Amino acid sequence: MRIILAALAATTILTGAAQATTVYPLDRATILAGSPFDFKVELKGVLKAEDVKVTVNGEDYKAVFGAPAEFVADEKGKDDKGLGSAMILRGLKLAKAGAYKIDVTAAGETKSITWTVFGTPETAKAKNIIFLLGDGLSVAHRTGARIMSKGMTEGKANGRLNMDDLDRMAFIGTSATDAIATDSANTMSAYMTGHKTAVNALGVYADRTPASLDDPKVETIAEALRRTSKKSIGIVSLAELEDATPAAVVAHTRKRADKPEIVGMFYDVKPEVVLGGGSAYFLGKDVPGSKRKDDKDYIKLFKDAGYALATDKAELEAASGNNTGKLLGLFHTGNMDTILDRKFLKKGTVGKFPNQPGLMDMTKAALEQLSKNPDGFFLMVEGASIDKMSHPMDWDRALYETIEFDQTIGLAREFAAKNPDTLIVVTGDHAHGASIIGTIDDEKPGTDMREKVGVYADAGFPNYEDKDGDGFPDKVDVTRRLAMFSNNFPDYYETFRPKMDGPFEPAIQNEKKEYIANPAYKDVPGAVLRTGNLPRSSDTAVHAVDDVVLQATGPGLEEFKGYMEESDVYRVLVDAFALGAKPAK
Amino acid sequence: MIDNPGGLLPPGLRLGNVMSAVFRPSRRQLMAGLATLPLSAVLRRAFAADDGLTFDELYGKVGVLGLEFSEKVKTLTGHDVAMRGFMAPPLMAEAAFFVLTEIPMSICPFCSSDSDWPDNIVVVYLNEKQTFAQAGALIEVRGRLEMGSWTDPDTGFLSLLRLRDADYATV
């Protein structure tokens, strides 16, 4: 099912900064030398082309850019409202590194901005990059996963996570171009393009016109690899492949909800390995279960392009041994289930999709295929449901997801041990406002769950057990468990317990479009109503603006340090691969 | 789309509905005759005669490459059925339908910009306006089951299963 109207995308405001002369890429943009991007100037007034003067480092822009921009007399907004004139030049490339000062002078308007075009070393430091993105991965997730998975005695961890032993660290700022707050689209887009953008946008700057597919584009890392190298590209996620994080590797749209179009963008780039959920957008509209509005059968298109198809764990194992070098794995019509549901509780949609592979299975298959390329590869692996379970404050599922994500980091480290020319980057895309504050102990007296929350010395240590040594607590609903809470929430019933019947759904919408506490949890023994501190339009807990922690190991790691922004991380990646080296392929 | 070209006819004024009215006179007469009784009492009585259909029974096969309607859905298509579920809030004021879901749900539990629904939803077109059921309240809907891809002309909402000419009551 799908809404065509944009009416529901209430949080997507399809306009840039109104009433100001704006130049895209924005001021302080960093641009890989030789990478194509769209240049756009949005003017306030309706002007004549000859009345607008644009210079680059003092020269007429046409001399530097090599082509004239298209002049739009009056751009149209919603309901055909005039927005002002604009200049657009698509696919511009700047080969020479350095500062580019752009000055726009027009009747009553001036704007001055500067870009930095950067080159890279001539020689690559790394042959392969494995970029592991824990969606929403915050410090509390790491701490919680460590305590749950490894245990703790007398204040010392009984074991270390795989992410605990990566060599370098940086604090990463995650804010968007339009807000300090952020979402998984603009954040991953900044990692994958080197350009910050607006909430909900992928691979584009957010301009002022309503259309979502015409915004000024920037190059994604996948496109840069196609342009400059023969490396393979892999994308692995437990989310729908059209979801923001995996999409950001290939996509260009102002609106992450353009999922049918995003499948087409995957097809345009054709990453060698694509594994995840979201088959509904690959099916033509007449197939029950499809979420497309056209008849395009992308399953067939990918197969015709030489891809082996896998739809469950067994098929993935079979396909990962083949020699086609191209693998499409679709394991769910929507988002894949969490490991707590897949492996332990059999809830969620596991009944309908009982043979889904896990993140480890998918990453292993991807590495097997990609490592066949003598030129190397870029692999993006997303631990998607750390975020998808932190939104509804289902902390047990979020922490099990973090453990699975960490085990996948272990797999990457094993690969890098055998292939030392591999750079591993582990990071989150944004934080959640979640913290562990102690334990919840069912053995404490009484029925009032609030009084069973152990803080300070009363917290003691949880009693999770991992007798089978798989890294996951054998039982999630132990009697003394982690107490994790969100600092922001809609109205909801706090049950102080793991959600054994399926992922938590804290709030539902009423007829006034306000989110109210989901009454399904009202009668859970000990449940208490928490009155929300978020606007009533918020359905779940929201992302936090806090920095996230990036860790890295392998060649090229020395550039990670101190405070960086997601757009800066891109430069480290392309430096490691020397994607700005000349001559191009 | 063919059965409602250009969306000019409001739902409830299509040829198919006229036909269904012919086949279902008893309910209309019942409604008229018992107009003084509380509506819910009428509906409860009427529901007793219908075939029940549950969310678990919608699909015979669920797979990555598509779903397949169950034999029961195929058999009941064109007939009156009763289904229990939860009313998702109306998509927009002018929508002539609402979405019936298996569990109470928000439109998109996880994301800020998307409008994804689970596979097992049923779109309900009411025969006359009814007030919104309280969020989280279990309702029973009765209507004529319609199967197959259809795009709502006013909203662009694509559905696979619908209950037409329907009414509902809180259980």
Image (cartoon, coloured by chain):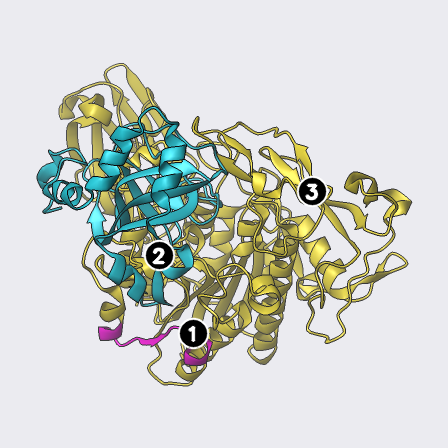
Chain colours: A yellow, B cyan
Q: Earlier in the sequence, mark 2 or mark 1?
A: 2
Q: Chain of mark 2?
A: A
Density class for disc 2 (Cα within 10 Å; few <14, some 14-19, many ≥20) is many
Q: Chain of mark 3?
A: A
Same chain check for tags 2 and 3? yes
Report the side of A228 relative to A51 (left or right): right
Where residue A324 sits, quadrant-wise, is bottom left
Report the side of A185 relative to A218 (left or right): right
Q: Is residue A198 visible?
A: no
Give the magenta range: A303-315
| Most distant residue in the front direction | B33
Q: Nearer the viewer, mark 2 or mark 1?
A: 1
Q: Position of residue A384 (x, y in %)?
A: 51, 56
Density class for disc 3 (Cα within 10 Å; few <14, some 14-19, many ≥20) is many
Residue drawn 17% across the image and 46% down it: B23
Q: Position of residue B5 (x, y in %)?
A: 8, 41
User: Is label 1 in contact with label 3 (beta carbons under 8 Å)?
Assistant: no
SS state under label 1: loop
Q: Position of residue A76 (x, y in %)?
A: 20, 27
> In this figure, which residue is indicated by the disc labeled 1?
A312
> In this figure, which residue is indicated by the disc labeled 3?
A485
Between B155 and B42, the residue placed more toward the observer is B42
Instruction: Name above or below for residue A221 compared with residue A138.
Output: below
Q: Amino acid at mark 1?
A: Asp
Q: Amino acid at mark 2?
A: Val
> In this figure, which residue is indicated by the disc labeled 2?
A250
SS state under label 2: loop
Q: Earlier in the sequence, mark 1 or mark 3?
A: 1
User: Is label 2 in contact with label 1 (beta carbons under 8 Å)?
Assistant: no
